[in-house]
Image: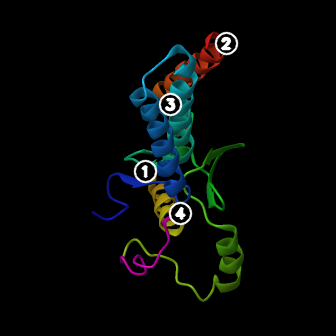
Amino acid sequence: MKPHDGVASFGPTSGGISGVVGVLCGVLFAASTLLHGLELSELRYLFGGLAFAALAWTILLRPRVRLLADHVELRNGFSDFLIPYAAISEVAIRSFTAVQVGEKRYIGLAVGRPRTSMTRRRKDQLARPTPDLASGKSLEGASAADLLQVTLEDRVHRAEREQSAVVRRRWALPELAVIAVCLVAFVISIFVG
């Protein structure tokens, strides 16, 4: 399937290894607390480890950009933005993905370019070929940020403009609930234990 057909998903371009290590450290810390016998004074370590793992997942591994049939989903740590292609006026990918809708700018933290790449990109912009979706040329060496920008701009260009296109925000309720429960339990366990 070519990226401009159907659904395309772009995961985090940085922080993936740190996120996996963070989740594993938090889970292993909580598990080691359970394996050594759980006493009231050690509950803070269990909930602290679980809160750390949940925060690492939410901040470093959850963000992504998904291109769906009629809208782009900018999935960040604590909320998602669902933006119809027809409403998008501009797309820019710097150290994060920015989508302009009228006067409002929406940010996606998953896909971005390193600062060195952005500086180098200005210098070789003429020498470096832009990925071409129609022919499939230059897609092999393209970065995730380049491929996302070209694919998203193509979908925005092909979208029919409509005045009723509405941007929706959706909160990451499962992640927020887990983090809130773990942090509240951690704070309570500090005073109880």
Residue 39 placement (x, y as % from top left):
49, 17
Q: Is residue 10 above or below residue 150?
A: above
Is residue 97 positioned above or below 162 on the image? below
Which residue is denoted by mark 2 in the rendering?
191
Front label number (2 vs 1): 2
Residue 120 is situated, as x and y percent measured from the top left of the image, at: 68, 80
Q: Residue furthest left?
A: 1
Amino acid type at mark 3: Leu
Quadrant where the C terminus sits is top right
- Label 3 SS: helix
Amino acid tagged 4: Gln
In-image side of 121 versus 47 (left or right)? right
Q: Are marks 2 and 1 in contact (CB under 8 Å)?
A: no
Q: Mark 3 highlights which residue?
A: 50
Give the camera-side residue of 81 and 14: 14
Q: Is residue 62 visible?
A: no
Q: Which mark's residue is nearer the viewer, 2 or 3? A: 2
Q: CA distance from mark 2 to mark 3?
A: 18 Å
The mark lying in front, picked from 2 and 4, is: 2
How packed is label 2: few (under 14 Cα within 10 Å), some, or many (20 or more)?
Answer: few
Mark nearer the viewer, 3 or 4: 3
Q: Residue at x 42, y 27 (%)?
A: 34
Q: Which residue is mark 4?
A: 149
User: Quick one: label 4, few (<14), some, or many (20+) residues within 10 Å?
Assistant: some
Measured in 3D between alpha carbons, the distance from the residue under mark 1 to the one under mark 3, in whole angstroms, is: 32 Å
Q: Which is more N-terminal, label 1 or label 2?
A: 1
